[in-house]
Image (cartoon, rainbow, N blue to C red):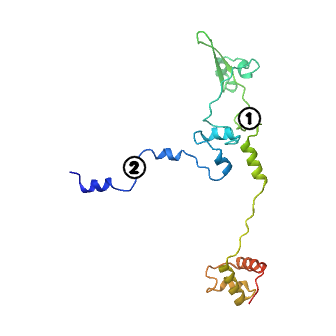
């Protein structure tokens, strides 16, 4: 016979603890831009979506997550030809000339090490290189450029009827004395500053308010 506590637990409306909550966090919800949200593919990763839309996810060099294509080294490549091959014994004798980074050249048949080729490094090697930007413009990029060219719409805040009635009472009682308005505890219950009250009154007057 099942106990009462176990029966209540089975009928509980609370969700059971599972290990599948992380799957819901992987989905990217685009709420900031309707153009990107309409063309977003949830089956692709963030980098793949940005590449498909013609955008770039980051301006610096990517640190991972992208499979690099291996290309055969050309004879004109300084890494393939290498600089002057130095012996390891001479490097040990002169620490200032030691090779900081080298490439191992092996025999293609036996796999034995033939030589070490020094890699030329400059002070700019550690600096992050900007990500390549595609020259082809996609439809999404054109829509975003058109949207950005419209400019930002400035929303003018209008005073409510309750705020206008409140300012009307302040002006009736204190006139243009904004310091007295600030110290009025009965009307200025939110303790607005004198400068804030001045801006509200000036905006109220511009709307054509008439003192009764």
Q: Which mark is residue 33?
A: none
The residue shown at (65%, 53%) is: 32
The residue shown at (72%, 86%) is: 171
Give residue 152's position: percent from left, percent from top: 75, 59
The quarter holding residue 200 reads bottom right
Alpha carbon distance from label 1 to label 2? 51 Å
Q: Which mark is residue 17?
A: 2
Which marked residue is nearer to the observer: mark 1 or mark 2? 2
Q: Residue furthest left?
A: 1
Q: Nearer the viewer, residue 110 or 144?
A: 144
Number of other residues with Cα within 10 Å of mark 2, as a class: few under 14, some 14 to 19, many 20 or more = few
Number of other residues with Cα within 10 Å of mark 1, as a class: few under 14, some 14 to 19, many 20 or more = few
The quarter holding residue 26 reads top right
Give residue 56's position: percent from left, percent from top: 69, 41
The residue shown at (74%, 22%) is: 78
Q: Nearer the viewer, residue 22 or 122?
A: 22
Image position of 73 with respect to 136: above or below: above
Give residue 15's position: percent from left, percent from top: 40, 53
User: Does the CB distance between marks 1 and 2 fall below 8 Å?
Assistant: no
Give residue 127's position: percent from left, percent from top: 71, 37
Q: Secondary structure at mark 1?
A: loop
| Among numbered discs 1 and 2, the one appearing first in the sequence | 2
Identify residue for label 1.
124
The quadrant of the rendering that contains the C terminus is bottom right
Q: How many marks?
A: 2
Image position of 113 with respect to 155: above or below: above
Q: Secondary structure at mark 2?
A: loop
């Amino acid at each position: 016979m099942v106990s009462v506590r176990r029966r209540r637990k089975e009928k509980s409306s609370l969700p059971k603890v599972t290990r599948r909550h992380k799957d819901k966090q992987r989905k990217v919800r685009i709420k900031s831009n309707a153009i990107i949200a309409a063309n977003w593919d949830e089956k692709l990763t963030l980098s793949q979506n940005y590449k498909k839309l013609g955008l770039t996810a980051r301006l610096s060099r990517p640190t991972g997550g992208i499979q690099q294509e291996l290309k055969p080294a050309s004879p004109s490549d300084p890494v393939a030809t290498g600089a002057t091959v130095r012996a390891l014994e001479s490097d040990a004798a002169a620490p200032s000339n030691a090779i900081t980074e080298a490439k191992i050249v092996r025999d293609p048949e036996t796999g034995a090490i033939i030589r070490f080729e020094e890699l030329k490094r400059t002070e700019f090697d550690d600096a992050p290189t900007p990500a390549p930007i595609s020259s082809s413009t996609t439809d999404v990029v054109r829509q975003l450029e058109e949207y950005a060219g419209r400019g930002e719409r400035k929303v003018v805040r209008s005073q409510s009827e309750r705020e206008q009635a409140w300012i009307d009472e302040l002006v009736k009682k204190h006139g243009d004395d904004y310091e007295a308005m600030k110290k009025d505890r009965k009307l200025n219950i939110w303790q607005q500053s004198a400068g804030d009250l001045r801006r509200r009154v000036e905006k109220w007057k511009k709307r054509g308010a008439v003192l009764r």
